Amino acid sequence: MTGRFARDLTIRQLRALATVQATGSITSAANRLALTQPAVTLQLRNLQALAGLPLIQRTGNGMALTDVGRTVLALAERVELALLDCEQALDMIAGRTGGRVSIGAVSTAKYFVPFVIAAFSQRFPKIDVSLKIGNRQDIHAALRGYDLDIAIMGQPPVDLEVEMRPLGEHPHIIVAPASHPLSKRRRCSAPDLSNETFISRESGSGTRMLMERFFEKHGLQPKIGLEADSNETIKQSVIAGLGIAFISQHTVSHELDEGRLVAIRLEGLPVMRHWHAIRRSDKVLLPAAQAMLEFLGSEGSRYLPARGTRRRQVAPRH
């Protein structure tokens, strides 16, 4: 059966199965494929004969795939991707188009990812790039669902096999308004923060978990005065004097340069993490996405905010 299956299988058969799965009926599949119902039925019958096992079954909600059908559907998806890969490669070689790439980035990365995309687009002007910005859970879900070619984040979901390309260091610091008493000290200790109110990212965010581990390590329980799902809200809240914040240095580089925020000098800071470009190991990258992955791995670090941010000089408190 195996030899005959590989020899006699056709793309029309696979597309008939995939379309029935997508539409839920042979009638709808026939309309979408611009075929007659008997033609679709014949394609399915021939495919099922090659498989030697039932592929579809009728349910109260229409036609549904069996476990075997889902296995063959996975083959159909891989075949379609291979065909698209070939088509895009031919178009790129012929100079007709550059293909498409879908990128997702956690919200903290939005301060540098657009600059990476701009540089990439200058080099590959015919490649269309789509960008999705979301929180950690959103990007994890999109990566799991094969919606993204590449995700830019710190760490991938633990339940996925991935390939990671390092982009560079990602420092986290504690910031305060320029007028805050702690901003005037040359060096602070963890107990100095025990009475401070923190403006924090929402529970479950990467920054929040990193902050909680940092304070747990120092035996402190920070007082959370305000939770926000936006780094911009956190920055403005700190500037307004509502509290201080544990935050990615990449999100506050301009405010530090302008003196609206000050990095508190504390032992153990900055807490260093790393940015990565991540792809699912089992997702076939088409040429455009592969070009983006290579670009991120070789040049992405150039677009990270500089760590040598100018700090406001203040006299130590005696």
Image (spheres, rainbow, N blue to C red):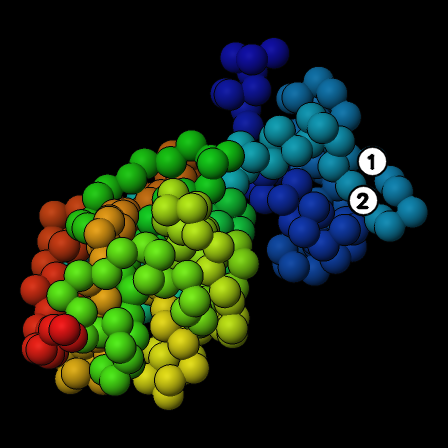
- Toward which corner of the image does residue 307 lie, by quadrant? bottom left
Q: State the quadrant of the N terminus.
A: top right
Q: Find disc 2 in the rendering and name its residue.
A: 63
Return the residue found at the far front.
Answer: 318
- Residue 316, x across and y down, in percent: 12, 73
Cβ–Cβ under 8 Å for marks 2 and 1:
yes
Say what amino acid the circle numbered 2 marks.
Met
Front-lying residue, 78 or 211: 211
Front-lying residue, 201 or 106: 201
Question: In terms of secondary structure, where does tag 2 sit?
Answer: strand
Front-lying residue, 144 or 71: 144
Query: At x 60% / y 36%, what residue is drawn?
Result: 73
Instruction: Give the left or right position of residue 308, taking residue 192 as reference.
Output: left
Q: Earlier in the sequence, mark 2 or mark 1?
A: 1
Say what amino acid the circle numbered 1 marks.
Gln
Query: Is residue 98 in view from this perspective?
Result: no
**Cα distance in 3D space between marks 2 and 1:** 6 Å
Q: Residues within 10 Å of mark 2 (few under 14, many from 20)?
A: some
Question: In terms of secondary structure, where does tag 1 sit?
Answer: strand
- Residue 187, x across and y down, in percent: 17, 61
Query: At x 40% / y 76%, what residue is drawn?
Result: 243
Query: At x 33% / y 62%, what residue is drawn?
Result: 192
Q: Find disc 1 in the rendering and name its residue.
A: 57
